[in-house]
């Protein structure tokens, strides 16, 4: 869990404009008074699942183990843009992940670029299987702030046992 110093450092690195800074501050104040369940302000952090499709079969994941029963779908760029356009003036951070592998959505790079152009700190959760050298270069070029890669094993056998694929 990030410490107050880490959160402050991230906040200052983002250099939010007055509207974002005010919204963030008011959210934090309302949380300190115990009003966080029903915020009076816009969210300053958003977590998006760009797809619920995954290329692995992780034993503990409801998606990979087959327990998650919903049609496979991906968020379109236009739907994403509609959401962000309503919130961009207030958002400081966006997390991309969920029960699917974000890079299986064909619009992921456009989505990441759009978030970065709005001055939003972007962190993405991935299993790294859908990325090649070109994709990695795009992530760097887009300026993704934080990349969290799932490495769920300490050797080939443990990885295969958990992930259901050989990819250690």
Image (spheres, grey):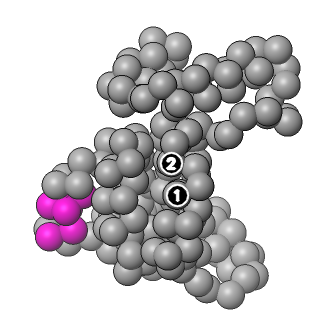
Residue 85, numbered label: 1
One can see residue 165 in this view: no
Could you tell me how far apart the alpha carbons at marks 2 and 1 are, in whole angstroms? 5 Å
For this view, does 112 lie left or right of residue 161? Answer: left
Label 1 secondary element: helix
Which residue corresponds to mark 2? 88
Quadrant location of the C terminus in the rendered image: bottom left
Q: Is residue 88 magenta?
A: no
* Image vertical order of residue 145 relative to residue 117, above or below: above
- C-beta proximity under 8 Å, tags 2 and 1: yes
For this view, does 20 lie left or right of residue 33? Answer: left
Residue 125, numbered label: none
Quadrant location of the N terminus in the rendered image: top right
Q: Quadrant of residue 112?
A: bottom left
Pinpoint residue 38: horizontal percent, then vertical percent.
85, 36
- Provide the residue span drawn in magenta: 134-139
């Amino acid at each position: 869990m990030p410490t107050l110093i880490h959160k402050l450092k991230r906040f200052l690195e983002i250099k939010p404009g007055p509207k974002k800074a005010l919204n963030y501050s008011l959210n934090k104040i309302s949380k300190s008074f115990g009003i966080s369940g029903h915020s009076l302000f816009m969210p300053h952090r958003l977590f998006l699942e760009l797809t619920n499709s995954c290329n692995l079969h992780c034993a503990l994941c409801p998606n990979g183990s087959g327990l998650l029963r919903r049609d496979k779908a991906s968020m379109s760029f236009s739907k994403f843009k509609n959401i962000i356009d309503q919130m961009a003036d207030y958002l400081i951070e966006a997390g991309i992940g969920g029960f699917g592998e974000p890079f299986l959505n064909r619009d992921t790079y456009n989505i990441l670029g759009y978030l970065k152009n709005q001055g939003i700190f972007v962190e993405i959760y991935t299993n790294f299987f859908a990325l090649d050298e070109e994709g990695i270069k795009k992530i760097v070029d887009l300026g993704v702030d934080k990349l969290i890669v799932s490495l769920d094993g300490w050797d080939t056998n443990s990885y295969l046992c958990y992930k259901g694929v050989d990819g250690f």
